[in-house]
Amino acid sequence: MDIGFSSMKIMQLSEGEKQAQVVGYGVNRFDSNAIKDGVIVDPESVAKSALDLFKNHIVGNITTRRVALSVPAMRTFNRPVKLPLLGDKELQEAVRLEAEQYIPMPIDDLYLDFTVLRKTDKEADLFVVAVPKIIVDSHLTLARVLGLDVVALETTIGASSRLFYTAELNNDVPTILIDFGSKSTDVTIFDKTLVVTGTVTGGGDDFTAQISQKLGVTLEEADTIKTKYGLRHSKKQEQILATLQPMLEELLKETRKMVRYYEERYGPNAKIQQIVTMGGGANIPGLSDYMTDNLRLPVRMSDPWLHIGFSKLQPPSTIERSMYVTVAGLALINPKEIFSP
């Protein structure tokens, strides 16, 4: 279950002989005032929308109460950390001390986790993630209200990167993943695992709102203009580009910063090979070409659905599929990672 700014998506997958198969999926909206700074402040309202989703908006069937939940990456603190080789207990304490140095809130108010990225005989590179307990606990409260058994929580970009690694071709080269949410965009270096991630303000809903305001049209009309014309050559191209350029420039700036970081940290032979866009805002026509021209790197939109089947279910439309990237990544969690023998 992926709970976003004003919508929730659910998806259940099963193993197939050649590819994972969708058992059930669906989406429903809720009042955006029910969530504030990542905290579900009105769980009853969100729960009501969730129950309506389960009852009326599922394609296929959801057959389990076990759930993996997403946590918005923009509300987390994450950082690559280099530490000397230590035992497990000493390493946990060292991570905690390191986190206290860069996180601007009390460490006791956070859930802290880390992944070992690389090891030498002397030191280890880690990826450290901390999430405010108030955010996590509000999601757990919602799950209890719905009678769901939470087995995992993961950042939105962590889930999206799993989908990229599991279901995409050319997934074994250093890649920048750009995941467009509704109100923010995550920019991440992925090299067989998450290396570092950042967030810029502005997502798919903001693109639509800007077009609506600048062109003097309704939000529904603006969304149609965005998905039909986008940045491709058309009579509206100049207007749309002028409207979206400030947000796109911030995205390009963050992406260039990520490229420099990777090359400086891992040496002159370490090169980003590609950029892959995903999420609801990635379906703007012409966006990949625009970014390729400005970044001088190949940019393409993620297409994991070549490797995930919908069996006999009616699949979502091509435009709608992009919104299911995060929830599909959550559904791909290997049960063996959670339920050990």
Image (cartoon, grey):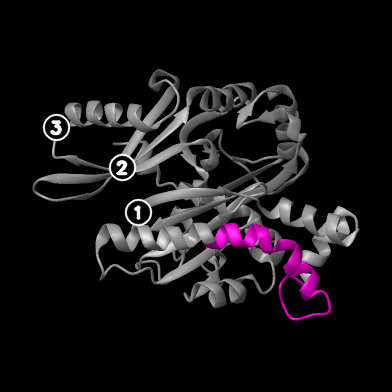
The kind of secondary structure element at disc 3 is: loop
Asked if 69 appears above or below 236 in the picture, the reply is above
- Marks 3 and 2, how far apart in space? 14 Å
The one nearer the camera, 234 or 101, is 101
The kind of secondary structure element at disc 2 is: strand
Tag on residue 193?
1
- Name the spot of residue 129 as percent of width and height, x first: 39, 37
Q: Amino acid at mark 2?
A: Thr
Q: Amino acid at mark 1?
A: Thr
Residue 132 seen in the figure: yes
The residue most toward the left is: 121
Asked if 94 appears above or below 16 in the picture, the reply is above
Badge 1 vs badge 2, beta-carbon distance below 8 Å: yes
Upstream in sequence: badge 1 or badge 2:
2
The answer to whether 43 appears left or right of 148 in the picture is right
Quadrant occupied by the N terminus: top right
Seen at 80% across and 70% down, the residue is: 239
Seen at 15% across and 45% down, the residue is: 123
The residue at which mark 3 appears reads as 87
Tag on residue 115?
2
The answer to whether 246 appears left or right of 264 in the picture is right
Residue 313 seen in the figure: no
The crowding category of the residue bearing disc 3, from other C-alpha atoms within 10 Å (few below 14, some 14 to 19, many at least 20), is few
Q: What is the total number of numbered labels drawn onto the structure image?
A: 3
The kind of secondary structure element at disc 1 is: loop
Q: Which residues are magenta?
A: 229-252
